[in-house]
Amino acid sequence: MFKAWFITYHSRYLMKVCAGIDLHANNNYLGVVAVDGKRLFCKKLRNDPGMILNAFVSFRQDVVGVVVESTFNWYWLGAVPARDICCQFP
């Protein structure tokens, strides 16, 4: 039911993708999925802004949102400008 609502509500984003980052102390797991739920990218990476930005290179034009799951160690990732990850931000 949620998936049907999401696709209907965000029909302008069809062919767009969303990303999620599960952030740990020294590494993270980055996943990128299409609106239809198809996994496009998933990989464990070091906590290095350059590596994360490099992983987004091929998806940058299509990313409409990024969700980060973290506890206390998110501050360094918050310093990365959103426009470098996603073209949807000015």
Image (cartoon, rainbow, N blue to C red):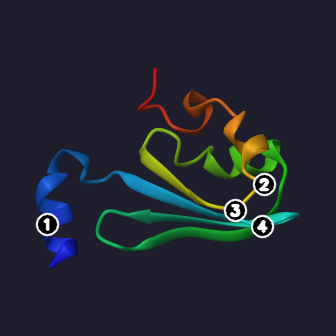
* Dot in front, 4 or 3: 3
Image location of residue 51, percent across then percent down: 79, 50
Tell me the kind of residue under disc 1.
Trp
Decide which of tag 4 and tag 1 comes sooner along the chain. 1
Decide which of tag 4 and tag 3 comes sooner along the chain. 4
Tell me the kind of residue under disc 3.
Thr
* Dot in front, 1 or 3: 3
Tell me the kind of residue under disc 2.
Asn
Relative to residue 13, is residue 21 depicted above or below? below
Say whether residue 79 is left or right of residue 87.
right
Residue at the spot of label 3: 71
Helix, strand or loop for disc 3 = loop
Q: CA distance from mark 4 to mark 1?
A: 31 Å
Badge number at residue 5: 1
Q: Residue at x 79, y 42 (%)?
A: 76
* Dot in front, 4 or 1: 4
Q: CA distance from mark 1 to mark 3?
A: 30 Å
The residue at the far front in this view is 72
Q: Residue at x 84, y 49 (%)?
A: 48
Of 85 and 38, the residue lying toward us: 85
